Amino acid sequence: MHKKIKIFISLFFIFTFLIIFQISSAKYVIENIYTVAKIDIDRCEPNIELIDIISSNTTYPTYANKAHFITGHIKITEKNIIKNNLSSNSIKFTVGNNLITPDFKSFSLISENTTEKTYEFSFTNITIDGPLTLIIPEGIVEDKSGLVNEQKSVSTGIIIDNTPPVTTFTEAASLDGKSKAEITSNESIQPINGWNLASTNTELSKEFSNSILYTLPVTDFAQNSSVVLIDIQKATNILLQYGSFVSSNNQILVSNGQVSAPNPTSSNSIYIKLSGHSNSSLKGKNYIYTNLKNGYIFSSITEWIASRLKDISDFSIVFQPFVKNVGWLEAISSEQENLYHPNNSISAFRINLVPKTEKQYLINFWNRDTGTTHIN
């Protein structure tokens, strides 16, 4: 019996040892498995993308010329970066098929976290025309696994345009004595107050009741402008004919808005004729003729015309006087104060009826035509 107890005790110790050994082995294996699980495997290459881009052209932000600033944001997505060469020197831009070198005003990191970096850039002075594309070269950014970003060609949606619109002007008379002016452009143009713009954005039209000559600026979506000469000659719905002559120095002759050399056959008087087409608001009014002696002031002439245009509210009177020993004064409209001293009587003038939407264009045209003086 004693021998059996010894054998039992021996077997117990052997069994206990084996259990402890197995537990330790299992713990060792578990710890090693846990260590293996902590290995960080990165199979995603760095990603660079254009988040947004816009031009400083607030009316048409997808169009720009060399004067506009183009601003955008680029984002890098990668948490294990070991090389980052993203800069204004590493990214490229093309306009059409042409590689360009923009004038960068800024390129800076504006936000970042463990996985993302966001950069803001701004540049200007792109001098050629075409669609703007961003080129992201391969290998700008590299991660710890040796992976690099891929090359990308990204359309920005912005059109660079530095060429002013090319336009043509035509006039077509109608049976009621009015004329239809039409402007045709080779590209899309912006609306102009008082003109009808076709759905194609390339044609403008307007009806005129009287003859007029002035320049009209036309602007495309990229804010490039060209000038169209509006020359209405066939409109007879309202006729304002006049002439003025300065006899003292034999220099100034004005006839229907045109300033020219003196005509030896002209009398030394100022005259105005106002009439209307049979279907106009001046119907029944025959030619009204008056001789205005040299020395009449602005209000006398414009009030005389305004009294015969009571039914025409969409017109302004544009008037430019010539004062002896002073010269041409600033052109003004019937809505403005007199710009010259009443003691300086006029000795010549030019005057026109103009749609209110065109008033400032005609004033600017006349002031450039003659050069002006301002009398306080």
Image (cartoon, rainbow, N blue to C red):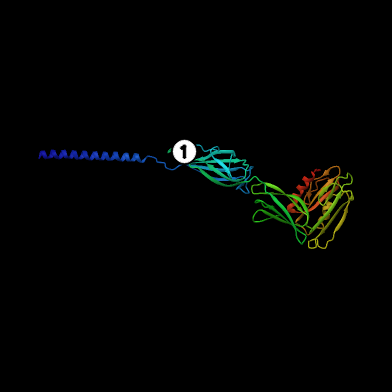
Residue 247 in percent (x, y) is at 89, 46
Q: Is residue 252 above or below residue 81?
A: below
Looking at this view, name the residue that lies furthest to the front.
97
Horizontal side of 255 relative to 224 (left or right) equals right
Residue 354 in percent (x, y) is at 77, 53
- Amino acid tagged 1: Glu
Q: Is residue 4 above or below residue 204?
A: above
Residue 85 in percent (x, y) is at 51, 37
Q: Quadrant of residue 275?
A: bottom right
Q: Nearer the viewer, residue 216 or 136?
A: 136
- Which residue sits at x=74%, y=53%? 356
- Which residue sits at x=30%, y=41%? 30
Q: Secondary structure at mark 1?
A: strand
- The quadrant of the picture occupied by the N terminus is top left
- Which residue sits at x=85%, y=51%? 243
Horizontal side of 266 relative to 166 (left or right) equals right
In this orientation, does residue 4 appear? yes
Q: Quadrant of residue 143?
A: top left
For label 1, the residue is 142
Q: Residues within 10 Å of mark 1 (few under 14, many from 20)?
A: many
Looking at this view, name the residue that lies furthest to the left.
1
Horizontal side of 63 relative to 322 (left or right) equals left
- The quadrant of the picture occupied by the C terminus is top right
Residue 333 in percent (x, y) is at 78, 50
Q: Nearer the viewer, residue 60 or 3?
A: 60
- Which residue sits at x=71%, y=52%? 168
In this orientation, does residue 50 appear? no
How many marks overall? 1
